[in-house]
Image (spheres, rainbow, N blue to C red):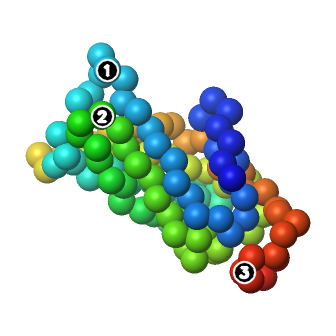
Amino acid sequence: MIVVKGNTLMVSQNDTLLTFFKMAAEGYILKGTETVRFSIKERLTDLNPVITTTCFIDTVNNIIRVFVDKSVMARLDAGTYYYDLDLTKSDGFHTTLVYPSKFIVREVVHSDGAGN
């Protein structure tokens, strides 16, 4: 399960993460040659993220798809983390698409064989 409140993402512990970010029609048009990364840190001050994934770019609909397998998401204990989304072009242009925002991992009651 995933819940979106503003830029805050809430996910169920040990679930696959699948979410989408739509670029504003009047904003940047994705060409598919960019690299877009979704990163999660425990604390904003940490040097390295605990998870970073390269995103799929849908140029037809101007959408960024974030997918993180449940085996990778299992690295995250329940709690509050922070994520951001950044874009880099081949010419070196780099920009943050989503400022650091809360990423909340919620415990679940069911057991899916992943230790909870």
Q: Residue 34 bears which disc, if any?
A: none
Type of amino acid at the residue the image marks with label 3: Ala
Disc 2 on helix, strand or loop? loop
Q: Is residue 27 left or right of residue 66?
A: left
Which residue is more in the foreground, 94 or 97? Answer: 97
Q: Secondary structure at mark 3?
A: loop
Residue occupying the point 23% across, 39% down: 59
Give whichever of discs 2 and 1 has the lower sequence position.
1
Q: Earlier in the sequence, mark 3 or mark 1?
A: 1
Do the residues bearing badges 2 and 1 touch, measured as CB atoms within 8 Å?
Answer: yes
Q: Is residue 13 left or right of residue 51?
A: right
Q: Secondary structure at mark 1?
A: loop
Residue topped by disc 1 = 25
Q: Position of residue 52 (x, y in %)?
A: 45, 63
| First-in-chain label (2 vs 3) | 2
Residue bearing mark 3: 114
Q: From mark 2 to mark 1, how far is it between C-alphas?
A: 8 Å
